[in-house]
Image (cartoon, rainbow, N blue to C red):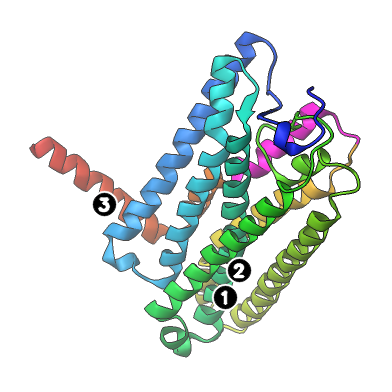
């Protein structure tokens, strides 16, 4: 570990590797490559299918398209660099690369929190106020809400990046994760200088908690509306439209909460696994969650694939 007096003298950071032996490094590379390609394929299929099928041009699928874009961005920020380091047997990431990774990951995650909150509002209006759905969630309103989610992520990431990397770094340059993120960079800062970023983190946590409360309140209202429906088939059909979003929110919150509340005494290896779970698993699994119970999306995707295959065979 290089002992540095301030951040201006640091030209690179050292990321935590998943394995030390060459065989395990190559295994990590191929494993991450498979997960990354599966995530890209799943999210790409969702994006292309929704854009191609005009029956899916509704607010719910418009927000799902945005979620797929954010998932592709977040997993592309962390996984390729980790794969390259394992393939070339190195731990290095440049200072500029760390800043970019830090900014982009925080941007995509913050925007996803905002978008999941917007998606819960979409489900609330669709189920609890169906007569006002077209008015409250018209095309212009949907674009504005999606833009607000992306803008909130950008603003949050910009503030965190500027605040964090303006701190003097006195604790070396070894990052105890396989990518650059806020807590790990703060650990490298001088003990007396991180209070400014700590306050910004507190504000961000309060905002995230507010989003969580909004989602919970929305689903309480949704459950009450569903239980009042006279038809059991209607209750099942209506609630099934909420299950994918509820599963994605649960996965996102549970992995993030476990990461934040895990004991500080856990081993670096287990901490590495935890960081993998909350940064890589949700973007890869979300397409499966949304296509699992959504027959309309599955039918449209199958129609798209068979259509491309037929055209290819005709050519």
Instruction: Tell me, yes or no, if residue 138 can be seen here.
Output: yes
Residue in front for this viewpoint, 132 or 185: 185
Residue bearing the label numbered 2: 117
Residue bearing the label numbered 3: 303
Q: Is residue 195 above or below residue 152?
A: above
Marks 2 & 1, CB-CB < 8 Å contact: yes
Instruction: Tell me, yes or no, if residue 288 can be seen here.
Output: no
Say whether residue 281 is left or right of residue 300: right
| Image location (x, y in percent) of residue 162 | 67, 53
Residue density around tag 1, few if under 14, some if 14–19, many if 20 or more, within 10 Å: some
Query: Which segment is the magenta one?
Result: 265-282
Marks 3 & 2, CB-CB < 8 Å contact: no
Is residue 272 rendered magenta in the image?
A: yes
| Image location (x, y in percent) of residue 124 | 57, 78
Q: Is residue 99 above or below residue 89?
A: below
**SS state under label 2:** helix
**SS state under label 1:** helix
Residue density around tag 3, few if under 14, some if 14–19, many if 20 or more, within 10 Å: some
> Mark 1, mark 3: which one is toward the viewer?
1
Circle on res. 189: none
> Mark 3, mark 2: which one is toward the viewer?
2
Q: Compare marks 3 and 2 and give the one earlier in the sequence.
A: 2
Residue 59, by quadrant, is: bottom left
Magenta stretch, overall SS: helix
| Image location (x, y in percent) of residue 227 | 63, 79
């Amino acid at each position: 570990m290089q002992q540095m007096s301030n951040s201006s003298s640091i030209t690179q950071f050292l990321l935590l590797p998943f394995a030390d032996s060459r065989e395990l490094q190559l295994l990590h590379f191929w494993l991450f490559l498979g997960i990354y390609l599966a995530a890209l394929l799943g999210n790409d299929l969702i994006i292309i299918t929704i854009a191609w099928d005009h029956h899916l041009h509704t607010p719910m699928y418009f927000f799902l398209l945005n979620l797929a874009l954010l998932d592709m961005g977040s997993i592309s920020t962390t996984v390729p660099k980790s794969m390259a380091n394992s393939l070339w047997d190195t731990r290095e990431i440049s200072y500029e690369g760390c800043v970019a990774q830090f900014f982009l990951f925080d941007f995509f995650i913050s925007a996803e929190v905002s978008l999941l909150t917007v998606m819960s509002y979409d489900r609330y209006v669709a189920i609890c106020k169906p007569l006002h759905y077209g008015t409250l969630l018209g095309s212009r309103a949907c674009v504005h809400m999606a833009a607000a989610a992306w803008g909130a992520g950008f603003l949050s990431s910009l503030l965190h990046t500027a605040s964090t990397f303006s701190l003097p770094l006195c604790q070396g340059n070894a990052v105890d994760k396989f990518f650059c993120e806020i807590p790990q960079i703060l650990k490298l800062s001088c003990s007396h200088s991180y209070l400014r970023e700590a306050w910004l983190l507190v504000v961000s946590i309060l905002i995230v908690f507010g989003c969580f409360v909004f989602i919970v309140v929305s689903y309480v209202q949704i459950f009450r509306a569903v239980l009042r429906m006279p038809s059991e088939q209607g209750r099942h059909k209506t609630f099934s439209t909420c299950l994918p979003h509820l599963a994605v929110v649960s996965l996102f919150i549970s992995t993030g909460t476990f990461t934040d509340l895990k004991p500080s005494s856990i081993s670096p290896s287990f901490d590495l696994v935890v960081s993998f779970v909350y940064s890589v698993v949700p973007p890869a699994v979300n397409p499966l969650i949304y296509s699992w119970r959504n027959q309309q999306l599955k039918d449209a995707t199958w129609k798209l694939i068979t259509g491309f295959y037929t055209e290819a065979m005709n050519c």
